[in-house]
Amino acid sequence: MCGIVGYIGSKEATPILVEGLKRLEYRGYDSAGVAVLTNGKITIEKQAGKIGGLEKHIVNRDLSGKSGIAHTRWATHGHPTQTNAHPHADCTGTLALIHNGIIENFGAIKTELIANGHNFITDTDTEALVHLIEEYYNNGHDLEAAVRAALSQVEGTYGIAVISSTEPDTLIAARRGSPLVVGVGENEFVVASDVSAIISHTKDVTYLEDNEVAIIKRNKLTIKTIDNLEVDKKVEKIAFDLEKIEKGGYDHFMLKEIMEQPQTIRDAMRGRLLEDEGTARLGGIQHEIDSLIYAPQMLFSACGTSWHAALIGEYMIEEFVRTPVEVEYASEFRYRDPVIERGSVMFVISQSGETADTLAALREGRRKGAKVLGICNVVGSTIARESDAGVYLHAGPEIGVASTKAFTSQVTVLSLLTLLLGRMRNMGASKGVRIVKEMEALPEKVSSILENQGTIKAIAREYHQSQNFLYLGRGYNFPVALEGALKLKEISYIHAEGYPAAEMKHGPIALIDENMPVVFIATKDSTYEKIISNIEEVKARSGRIIAIATEGDTEIKKLADHVIYVPQTLEFLTPILTIIPLQLLAYYIAILRGCDVDQPRNLAKSVTVE
Ligand code: AGP
């Protein structure tokens, strides 16, 4: 959700904090602020809007100092205004605090503190926390103890950083529910919501767990629990280089990440395909194979794009492994008291590994006795650390808010899992070898789609002013229809719906007229004839038809207004190809509509609050 960053060391803090905010901007971008210890007092500057605005605002202001904190916001409580932007100060300006998360009992705390004479100036939940810390600070606690005492009263989630003008050599950070990482440098420390704000300073990091507090002095880091017990933490290495989080010459991270997919699909398969045996190997879950193969039931739980990948995983596992699979929206699963059979295995799928609902689903599944395995992209993320075991996507950092390469890598990993378990069930070696060969050919096939963007750009030009879109698919391509619609919604703000093609007759067909573009994923597979009938039904009502079809299918040209061809592959692997044109279509339509594709309105890359 929000992005927080703090610095204490020997260098000027402000440039480091502003650079850190830019790296974290994909987490939330409706307002921003910075607080720096300058000449013994805390100076706070904040602005509504993007970090660029804050940067202009502070150009001629004295924000010199060697420690400070900064924040980029995704508003939960109180409009994204300058006043509600973080950092928040206490009554005297002695303390400044930044927060990522939600203080659920802020109302009760605020009422009590106002009665004690505190003066509140914002509509936020966060302000209650800085005044609560002030309450303890004014009653003889030092900064560390005041923060721990206040946090022991808080209900909800937080990643926070706090500074004080009366303890200039101290920075306190703490987490519960929201991610927080401490970068350990040469006589300096950078604390941040994720490693992207740390990597240009050091690759040595330590990840805070829930209810841990970091007491950071200029040259010493101590980690304690909220109950004052010291914790011995290991320092880990960040697994990628800085250029991985640069645009690499592309206009947008989203386009860069779309174009990276031949390589990221290759990386998801690297060392995991065993051609001779016609099977796959997933080192991260190898020791859990028995519980997987004998599981009476599998559950996939996720949110958004990851949930769409889970749906495809369900189709694959049930077709080739014959184990029943339940796909669960994590936000529903955590509250609906699900029935989980003994011995069940639950996969939680999350690109960021920090999505609050998916993390809660993980904990609920474990509470109900399931073995919990993770499929994540971000190394060291909370879901990866809390899972019993798991598989990393190795897709590299995904910065664009609209997920693209993570989706094709998730489907690739689910295909590997299907091959691995399928070969342990009824799939023969020759079929396995065929699948391995087809998977190895995927990156080239994706490249060939990316090399032919002309048709997609022309379609985008023709339909970028449409108000509605319908996406229809069958079987493995039904979830692709959902994902295609989500991409368009997210970045172009056009209302779009994905549907199983046959469901259209049960209602959505009423929407069809000459103004409704309908995208059909109509590759040559087991449901091809059926989807051709659905195309006929739309054509009969003057709908505009855009078909994603298999190369060589000339028949469909007679029916559809526009055809985008993708290479042939095995039916269960088609989603990895058919989603590519839909990602590009959404991208080019959004560009033509002047939308900010990397930071679409109202969204954030990692949803760390409920
Ligand atoms: C997808 O483009 C969105 N950014 C969003 O739906 C995302 O997939 C969802 O928030 C889940 O994120 P995760 O995979 O990091 O858990």
Image (cartoon, rainbow, N blue to C red):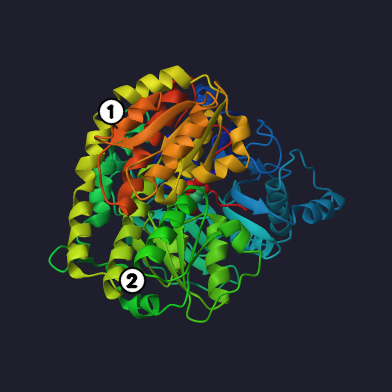
Secondary structure at badge 2 equals: helix
Q: Residue at x 36, y 22 (%)?
A: 457
Tell me, yes or no, whether the two marked residues, 2 and 1, touch with CB atoms within 8 Å.
Answer: no
Label annotation for residue 129: none
The residue to which callout 1 is attached is 249
Residue at 52% from the left image edge and 19% from the top image edge = 465
Between 25 and 142, which is closer to the camera in this rendering? Answer: 25
Closer to the camera in the image, 464 or 166: 464
Along the polypeptide, which appears first: circle 2 or circle 1? Answer: 1
Q: Position of residue 24 (x, y in %)?
A: 46, 41
Is any part of residue 62 visible from this angle?
no
Question: Which of the pair 126/368 is nearer the observer?
Answer: 368
Numbered-mark total: 2
Residue density around tag 2, few if under 14, some if 14–19, many if 20 or more, within 10 Å: some
Q: Amino acid at mark 1?
A: Gly
Residue 180 at x, y percent in the picture: 49, 55
Amino acid type, mark 2: Ile
Q: Position of residue 361 (x, y in %)?
A: 56, 64
Tell me if residue 587 comes above or below residue 243 in the rendering: above
Q: Picture coordinates of residue 516 (x, y %)?
A: 54, 26
Residue placed furthest toward the right: 115
- Label 2 and label 1: CA atoms lie apart by 37 Å
In front: label 2 or label 1 = 2
- Where 493 falls versus 464 (above or below)? below
Residue under pointer 2:
285
Q: Write the residue at 78% across / 42% down.
A: 120
Q: Is mark 1 within 8 Å of ligand 1?
A: no
